[in-house]
Amino acid sequence: GFLYCVSVKGVTGIRNKIDIEVIEFLKKLKGITDVPLALGFGISTISQVNEVKKYCDAVIIGSKILSILLNSDNFNNGIESVSKLAYEINSALKS
């Protein structure tokens, strides 16, 4: 399993930046548990992933995936775009 960590106070959705309180929260959690930490709510860019990857084990990008699918001209193109983003995020997490 994993702990689902929320990166914002309030509702889910795409955000522009990661609050420093989130980083401090993740650091504290890492100090008290060995359970993998997954950060979600507001994560939508590779730069955000790079910003938090030292402090969590996974990111959850549900709103970004939904946005890509809803804004694609057809379902197959949307799936292709989501696949590309997932590959980029996976690569960023591993680097």
Image: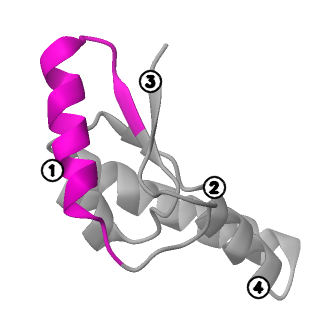
User: In the rendering, at what x and y percent does residue 15 appear?
Assistant: 47, 74
Q: Secondary structure at mark 1?
A: loop
Q: Is residue 64 above or below residue 94?
A: below
* In front of the other: 42 or 67: 42
Q: Amino acid at mark 2?
A: Gly
Q: Amino acid at mark 1?
A: Ser
Q: Is residue 25 above or below residue 79?
A: above
Left/right placement of residue 60 relative to residue 27 reads: right
2 vs 3, front mark:
3
Q: Which residue is mark 1?
A: 95
Q: Which residues are magenta?
A: 17-38
Q: Are marks 3 and 1 in contact (CB under 8 Å)?
A: no
Q: Which residue is mark 4?
A: 71
User: In the rendering, at what x and y percent does residue 8 appear?
Assistant: 45, 58
Q: Is residue 24 magenta?
A: yes
Q: Amino acid at mark 3?
A: Leu
Q: Residue at coordinates 12% horizontally, 20% vertically from top-left?
A: 31
Q: Which residue is mark 2?
A: 62
User: In the rendering, at what x and y percent does residue 39 appear?
Assistant: 41, 43
Quick one: label 2, few (<14), some, or many (20+) residues within 10 Å?
some
